[in-house]
Amino acid sequence: MDQNSETVIAQNRRVVEQFWATMGTNDFRAAGAWLHDNFVLEWPQSGERVRGRENFAAVNENYPAAGPWRFALRRLIADGGGAATEVEVTDGSITARAITFSEVREGRIVRQTEYWPDPFPAAPWRARWVEPAARPDVPCTGGGPAGMP
């Protein structure tokens, strides 16, 4: 990998890290500053699309949360096109995980595809081959910013 590619990857990582850090302030308009003019957010599970910073901020500002949102960035993998993240989100009442694929262009996030997977019980038939893994403290009960059902 050449130095130019490494620079682009580092820039993409920084943009996405800063986006999530700003989301943690609950100032969703400020988070919108990390979004490209042509930003589009896709939620494949609900079949919805959010276009633009204004709609992104409005969806998050108007979500009926129990309290301020807290975001914990658990994993970030960046490449030359953007980054994939795993983020734990809670409003103090519910906790969920978001898997977000962010495409970065011109130093801003131009597209996100976001999945909100619900936890489910382990299947008993697999017990002899698997071991318990960490799960969110509170099971996902629906509801949350930016696409939670």
Image (cartoon, rainbow, N blue to C red):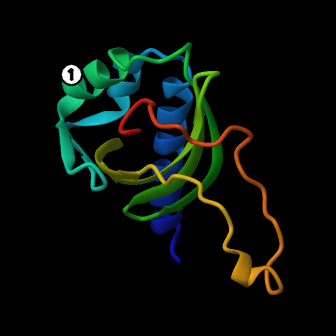
- Residue 7 location, x and y as percent? 50, 57
Residue drawn at (52%, 67%) of the image:
3
Q: Amino acid at mark 1?
A: Glu
Crowding around mark 1 (Cα neighbors within 10 Å: few <14, some 14 to 19, many 20+) is few
Choose top left, top right, bottom left or bottom right for residue 68.
Answer: top right
- Residue 65 location, x and y as percent? 47, 18
Residue drawn at (41%, 38%) of the image:
148
User: In the rendered image of this protein, does residue 56 appear above or below residue 25?
Assistant: below
- Give the quarter of the figure containing the C terminus: top left
- Residue 126 location, x and y as percent? 72, 82
Q: Nearer the viewer, residue 99 or 143?
A: 143
Left or right, residue 18 beside residue 122: left
Instruction: Find disc 1 in the rendering and name its residue.
Output: 54
Residue drawn at (49%, 26%) of the image:
23
Residue drawn at (27%, 28%) of the image:
56
Find the residue positioned furthest to the bottom. Answer: 129
Left or right, residue 56 beside residue 8: left
Counting the numbered discs, the total is 1
Find the residue positioned furthest to the front. Answer: 124
Q: Nearer the viewer, residue 44 or 41?
A: 44
User: In the rendered image of this protein, does residue 66 appear above or below residue 71?
Assistant: above
Left or right, residue 24 beside residue 111: right
- Residue 94 location, x and y as percent? 59, 30
Find numbered disc 1 in the image and state the secondary structure of the residue it sits on.
helix
